[in-house]
Image (cartoon, rainbow, N blue to C red):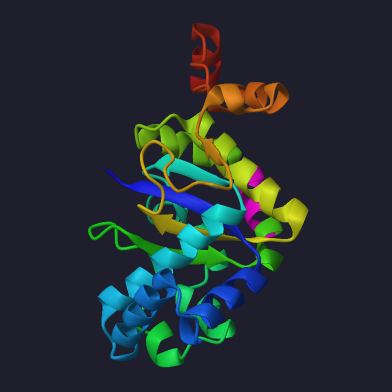
């Protein structure tokens, strides 16, 4: 089960997280992160994954977490629309910009490794979130069709993705994905939890998505005959 979450992030929060992890704090949680940091400095991917997961858990305390089984930025790019990949950046860039030693940052995979779990993944910088939102809007029918083919509730999933984009855009935040950062019952989402649910979608948007998700009508007999001629 791919328990994916999207986390709106302020770059300043990432900088504070990195500073606490690499500084002199003696807090127990920071000491544990510092141990992971030492592993990552040596190129150990397990330590790097622990660091990227820790960031998602920190972000989940400040902002709502947008939770969906089987749908993160990595999955969206790989299974639904390759165009999303143009807007994604690897976690190493996010951590490197925040001051993390590049040796540790480069030990992080560029996307979620869905076979391993418990890690952070790609991110969309704040300046690119409006572009992601426009991409979803402009290719709505295509996304809905492919989500349906992937046996997902396409309307609920699109509603969640659009809600995450709107929340981040309105506040000038980016979006960061993670795997298993939030428990199946919302554990760890102290900043709030938003799940994929049609009932949560604004009624006007829900009607629009439901209409766009309907399969095209089959042409009638007269139309087919005229088409042949």
Residue drawn at the location 44% of the way across and 29% of the way down: 153
> In the displayed structure, would residue 71 be above or below residue 45?
above
Horizontal arrangement in the rendering, residue 82 relative to residue 184 (left or right):
right
Horizontal arrangement in the rendering, residue 40 relative to residue 213 (left or right):
left
Q: Quadrant of residue 39?
A: bottom left
The one nearer the camera, 163 or 56, is 56
Give coordinates of residue 40: x percent, y percent. 33, 84
> In the displayed structure, would residue 180 be above or below residue 104?
above
Residue drawn at the location 41% of the way across and 32% of the way down: 148
Residue drawn at the location 39% of the way across and 36% of the way down: 185
Give coordinates of residue 25: x percent, y percent. 50, 81
The one nearer the camera, 83 or 16, is 16
Main SS type for the magenta part?
A: helix
Asked whether the viewer can see residue 198, the reply is: yes
Q: Quadrant of residue 16?
A: bottom right
In this view, the residue farthest toward the left is 115
Q: Which residues are magenta?
A: 131-138
In this view, the residue farthest toward the top is 221
Give coordinates of residue 217: x percent, y percent. 52, 17
The one nearer the camera, 137 or 229, is 137
- The tally of labels here is 0
> In the displayed structure, would residue 129 be above or below residue 98?
above
- Of the 4 image quadrants, the one containing the N terminus is top left
Give coordinates of residue 44: x percent, y percent. 26, 82
Residue drawn at the location 51% of the way across and 9% of the way down: 220
Asked whether the viewer can see residue 110, the reply is: no
94 is within the stretch colored magenta: no
């Amino acid at each position: 089960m791919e328990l994916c979450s999207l986390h709106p992030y302020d770059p300043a929060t990432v900088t504070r997280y990195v500073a606490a992890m690499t500084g002199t704090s003696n807090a127990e949680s920071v000491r544990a992160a510092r141990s992971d940091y030492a592993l990552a400095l040596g190129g150990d991917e397990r330590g790097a994954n622990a660091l990227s997961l820790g960031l998602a858990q920190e972000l989940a305390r400040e902002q709502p977490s947008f939770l969906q089984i089987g749908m993160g930025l990595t999955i969206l790019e790989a299974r639904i629309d390759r165009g999303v990949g143009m807007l994604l950046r690897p976690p190493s860039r996010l951590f490197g910009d925040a001051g993390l030693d590049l040796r540790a940052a480069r030990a992080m995979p560029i996307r979620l490794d869905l076979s391993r779990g418990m890690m952070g993944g790609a991110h969309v910088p704040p300046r690119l979130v409006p572009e992601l939102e426009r991409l979803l809007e402009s290719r709505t029918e295509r996304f809905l069709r492919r989500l349906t083919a992937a046996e997902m509730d396409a309307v609920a999933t699109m509603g969640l993705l659009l809600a995450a984009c709107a929340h981040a855009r309105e506040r000038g935040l980016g979006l960061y994905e993670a795997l298993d950062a939030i428990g199946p019952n919302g554990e760890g989402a102290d900043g709030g939890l938003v799940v994929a649910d049609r009932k949560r979608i604004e009624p006007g948007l829900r009607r629009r998505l439901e209409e766009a998700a309907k399969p095209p009508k089959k042409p009638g007999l007269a139309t087919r005959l005229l088409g042949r001629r």
